[in-house]
Amino acid sequence: MSGEGTLSVTSTAVTRRFLNKLNDSALARHHAPWRASLACLAALAVGAGGCGGGGAGGRPGTGAAAPGDSAARHTADSAAAMAAAHDTATEHRLSPSADSIAPYLVFAPTGERQFVAAVRNSQWLLDVGRMDLDVRKDSTKARAFREAAPVLSPVAPRTVFRLWWAKGAEDVVVDSFSVYNGRIVLRVIGSAMLDSAAHAKGSPTAFAVRADSATPPAATTCELRTEPDSAAQAALAALPPVERRAQLAVQKSADSAYAARVAFVRDSLDAEMRASPPPYERLQRRMKTTSSQVRGCFGAARRALVVSVRAGDAEWVRERLVLIAPDGAVTPLRVDDLRFRAHELLSALDADGDGVDDLAVKGTTHRAGGTAILRLDLAKKRAERLAAGFVWETL
């Protein structure tokens, strides 16, 4: 290396022609990570070692294999994929139209294993990145997107994912890139039960993990989502009508008492948080309370409740997340989600197979929002974010 800012490399390591292509590319002008890629190439040229992501929060090196399904691994990261797309010697060279929109495709890191899947327009979709260009009304741009996405994406079509959702876990295949509300998504192909859930009411959400498909999916252990025991149903049907009505009345009374306890806890949390209003008068006039609850198996608890007091466009938020057991016991949880200030519960699902249900939520912050999966740690009384997707922003 000679002179400040001057790079001297041998032709056997990196050719000057290739470096010029990197400098002249549109992505180099729009995205700072390309400077790190050039520094990485320089380190290789002078024998300084590999390009691994050695620091905290750094991106994984291009030489490390991405964790994923053992039958189909996709190891090229964004910089390497773009470099290959610009190299005249590669078979994946992009056409001029695809190359022109490539800088507007922002994908998740190559080493990312955890994604969010959700139903949008009666289809299961997997969120893998952000699209900074509207291609819906321009057929030329749409074709260019469909050409560029499979080349640049860290998630290859036909990749197998382990999908954890409300009914348990199953292996699915992702295919067919498209754009939804500014997000780059892949269509999810799964079982008939998964497909029918896409046409049901509500907002089904799932947690998708790139894992080895040789390991069979774990069945759900929550009795709320298992089929009723046929023997118990037969025993109930065999009872005389008077006894059967008496048992059903006892169950209905217990359910009503449980619902009343949940309502009491909700009102108490609302009153507690409203006792400390926001400091500004304009926000005090715009305060509102939202609450949501879902049923699930959260240890001894069977109901999760979140109460949020908000003012403005989520400028000021006070929120409480609690678990409520059938005997009335309340367990407060701390929410570790720095991105979103307020949350709305969508569904309960066991995202990590530990027998304790986790939460799919709709997160909101000032002028932005999205869908997230919160993992519940009952020992630490904490709900921490596993993954997020389908993020939206308003300017």
Image (tube, rainbow, N blue to C red):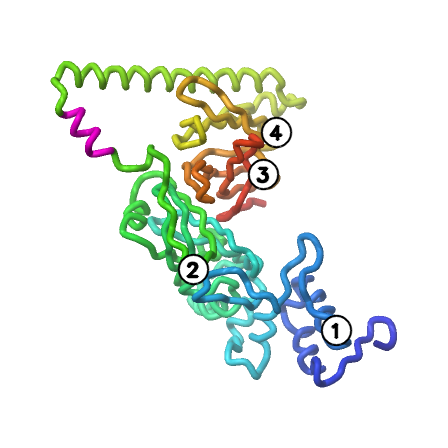
Please, what is the three-letter code of the amino acid marked with disc 3? Asp
In the rendered view, tell whether residue 110 sits above or below residue 356: below
Please, what is the three-letter code of the amino acid marked with disc 4? Trp
Which residue has dot 1 on it? 42
Mark 2 crowd level (few <14, some 14–19, many ≥20, 10 Å Cα):
some
Q: Residue at x 41, y 40 (%)?
A: 349
SS state under label 4: strand
Which residue has dot 2 on it? 178
Q: Which residues are magenta?
A: 229-237
Q: Quadrant of residue 337?
A: top right
Q: Residue at x 62, y 24 (%)?
A: 282
SS state under label 3: loop
Mark 3 crowd level (few <14, some 14–19, many ≥20, 10 Å Cα):
some
Give the spatial CA distance, label 1 vs label 4. 48 Å
- Horizontal arrangement in the rendering, residue 387 relative to residue 161 (left or right): right
Label located before the other in sequence (3 or 1)? 1
Give the spatial CA distance, label 2 vs label 1. 36 Å
Could you say where residue 318 lies in the image, as x and y percent from the top left? Answer: 58, 26
Please, what is the three-letter code of the amino acid marked with disc 1? Ala
Which residue has dot 3 on it? 337
Could you say where residue 147 lies in the image, as x and y percent from the top left? Answer: 46, 70
Which residue has dot 4 on it? 316
Q: Residue at x 48, y 38 (%)?
A: 362
Q: Inspect the magenta stretch and tell me whether residue 337 lies in it.
A: no
